[in-house]
Amino acid sequence: MWIVIAIVVMLFAIKTYINYSMIKEEIEKVNSDINLVQQEIAYSEKFYSKYLDSDYSNYFLSHKNNILFDWEYIIMITEKEEDNNSDSEYIKKNEWTKTPQESWKEFIKSKLN
């Protein structure tokens, strides 16, 4: 009889310890999430807001979104083929593209051919 009571008490103690450890892990996880959110808020308050208020924000944001200015070009650098083609034919074949969309279309055409 005492053995059955001892086993039941041990099972209850094990269950209680497992619940305690799970609660402790969840508390640590919530604290790390809170710390991460606080760091993101501090970054946006200290650096990102100053970055957006600066004179260069339009320049940086346009490059972040792959928007080119009028004086900028995308240049595709490739190795020269070993054929007997003249340089003018090579330049005509690999013309510069002005927009990312044109460059992407040229890339897809070259891969499909």
Image (cartoon, rainbow, N blue to C red):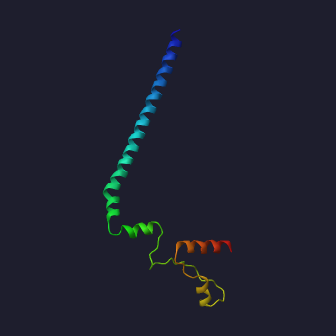
Q: Residue at x 50, y 13 (%)?
A: 5
Q: Residue furthest top?
A: 1
In the picture, which quadrant includes the C terminus?
bottom right
Residue 104, quarter of picture: bottom right
| Residue 103 image offset from top left, x and y in percent | 56, 74
Count of marks, rendered view: 0
Is residue 91 left or right of 19 when viewed as pictured?
A: right
Is residue 19 left or right of 112 when viewed as pictured?
A: left
Q: Residue at x 53, y 72 (%)?
A: 100
| Residue 23 image offset from top left, x and y in percent | 43, 32
- The residue lying toward the viewer, choosing from 103 and 79, is 103
| Residue 42 image offset from top left, x and y in percent | 33, 52
- Compared with 17, 29 (above or below) is below
Residue 44, quarter of picture: bottom left
- The residue lying toward the viewer, choosing from 95 and 8, is 95
Q: Residue at x 65, y 72 (%)?
A: 111
| Residue 108 image offset from top left, x and y in percent | 63, 71
Is residue 79 left or right of 60 when viewed as pictured?
A: right
- Compared with 35, 96 (above or below) is below
Q: Residue at x 31, y 56 (%)?
A: 46
Q: Residue furthest right?
A: 113
- The residue lying toward the viewer, choosing from 91 and 15, is 91
